[in-house]
Image (cartoon, rainbow, N blue to C red):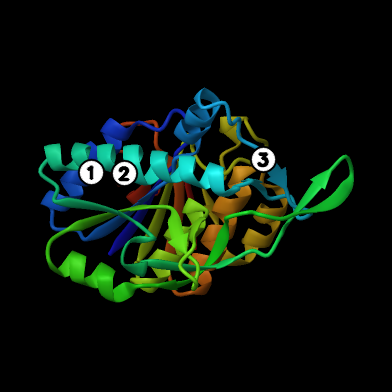
Amino acid sequence: MLVIKVGGAAGVNLNEVCNDLAVLAQSGRSFVVVHGGSDETNRMAERLGMPPRFVTSPSGFTSRFTDRETLEVFAMVTAGKINTLFVEALQRRGVNALGLSGVDGRLLIAHRKEAVRSVEDGKVRLLHGDHTGTITEVNTGLLGLLIDSGYVPVVAPLALSPEGVALNVDADRAAAVIAAAVCAECLILLTNVPGLMRHFPDETTLIPHLDRDQLGEALGCSMGRMKKKVLGAVEALDHGVRQVVLSDGRVEQPVRRALSGAGTVIG
């Protein structure tokens, strides 16, 4: 079993990803796909006159501040447009993909944050009204039912609070939690860079391999969204996933390249 997270940043080649996923499906491999939607959501929010607001936590993690209006835009883009077109692309290639978000069938349950801590002008502020969460539960019965019935689940990064409120969740960490829940042997994180780099954005400084005990250092030196990918890798490995690969989603055969060790192999 594989879990493949396809990044939502500009540059990821969805056609090549889908071509590769079709080859995997034809070879009999079982997998779950999780996708992001950051770049497309940003563009839509700008068109709607709601420019995205990003906050940085005291520990250096950058995330989208998601009030209710922003959540509705995020859901429209990720669970609507991106998920549907992703499923269409896979179906066109003969893959029996089924699109859903973490809201559907209570696939992902998440704890809603009471407030978000944001560093602004050197001071820490508490922001209320955020609709983001940390995943605490995966409906493995639903995923197993779909996979056993021959479907390829394609999951958009939304979740439900225990009270039934829709939440935005980080796609990398969602993929990590799902990988652990389905006992995946490998979690692949495809993005628009070749992997982790010692000196971002210099791609010649790619780190080809990291042991589990080196991840703390990697987390400390990673920039922006790469921090969440490293955190997702930590969470996946801590919960039994044997290997995580951060690899390039811009190239031909991105999934098979990742499986062959291209990128940063962790574990």
Quick check: marks 3 and 1 in contact, CB under 8 Å?
A: no
Q: Amino acid at mark 2?
A: Asn
Residue 117 in view, yes or no: yes
| Residue at the image point whose x is 55% and y is 52% from the top | 229
Residue 172 place in picture, x, y as percent: 49, 53
Quick check: marks 1 and 2 in contact, CB under 8 Å?
A: yes
Q: Is residue 192 above or below residue 27?
A: above
| SS for dot 1 | helix
Q: Amino acid at mark 3?
A: Phe
In the image: residue 218, left or right of residue 251: right
Q: Which mark is residue 87?
A: 1
Q: CA distance from mark 2 to mark 3?
A: 23 Å
Q: Is residue 264 above or below residue 177?
A: above
| SS for dot 2 | helix
| Residue at the image point whose x is 34% and y is 39% from the top | 82
| Residue at the image point whose x is 14% and y is 42% from the top | 91
Marker count (numbered): 3
Q: CA distance from mark 1 to mark 2?
A: 6 Å
Query: Can you tell which quarter of the image residue 143 is in?
Result: bottom left
Q: CA distance from mark 3 to mark 1?
A: 29 Å
Residue 150 place in picture, x, y as percent: 12, 61
In front here: 26 or 8?
8
Q: Which residue is mark 3?
A: 54
Residue 263 in view, yes or no: no
Q: Amino acid at mark 1?
A: Val
Query: Can you tell which quarter of the image residue 55 is in?
Result: top right
Q: Is residue 218 above or below residue 86?
A: below
Q: Which residue is mark 2?
A: 83
Q: Is residue 104 above or below residue 8?
A: below
Quick check: marks 2 and 3 in contact, CB under 8 Å?
A: no
